[in-house]
Image (cartoon, grey):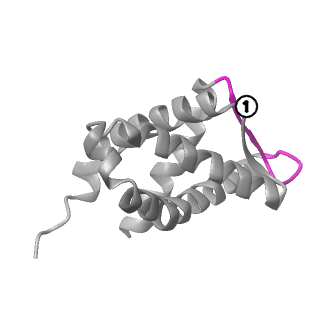
Amino acid sequence: MRLVVRLLINAVALWLTDLLIEGMHVTPFGPGGTLEIVLTYLLLAIIFGIVNGIIGNLIRIVAFPLYILTLGLIALVVNGLLLLIVSWISGLLGFGLTIDTFGWGILGALVLALISWLIGILLRPVIGKPRSR
């Protein structure tokens, strides 16, 4: 259940980030109806989750000394890079995210993280906190 909620949070955060960031655009995979647009954001959220889970964790492990050296500020660059990877993968699939430059990718990743965090805080009373074991 948490996976589905997290997927929906990321999809809504991607949509809001697309509205706010000028250098980030989403192209639906179909004629552009409401269903195609919603499915596009859900697919982008799935791709982002997979990229973040696999490639993101690998980069974070390898770049751990840089995280310490920069007090975590390198995370902005890493998240921007992950967003560009999502853009590249979705471009190969023929739909999805387009980011104009690396700078827009970093700004988009920052806004995406903030929006996801805010939505997660708002939904925490509804979905409950994870129980410690």
Looking at the rendering, the stretch of residues picked out in magenta corresponds to: 22-33
Q: Quadrant of the C terminus?
A: bottom left
Mark 1: which secondary structure? loop
Residue in the image at 69% along x and 48% along y: 87
Q: Quadrant of the N terminus?
A: bottom left
Q: Position of residue 40 (x, y in %)?
A: 70, 53
Magenta stretch encompasses residue 21: no
Q: Position of residue 130 (x, y in %)?
A: 20, 64
**Of the pair 60 and 104, the residue shown nearer to us:** 60
Horizontal relation, residue 120 to residue 99: left or right: left
In the image, what residue type sits under mark 1? Answer: Asp
* Residue that label 1 marks: 100
Name the quadrant containing residue 24: top right
Horizontal relation, residue 97 to residue 95: left or right: left
Q: Main secondary structure of the magenta part?
A: loop
Horizontal relation, residue 67 to residue 35: left or right: left
**Of the pair 84 and 120, the residue shown nearer to us:** 84
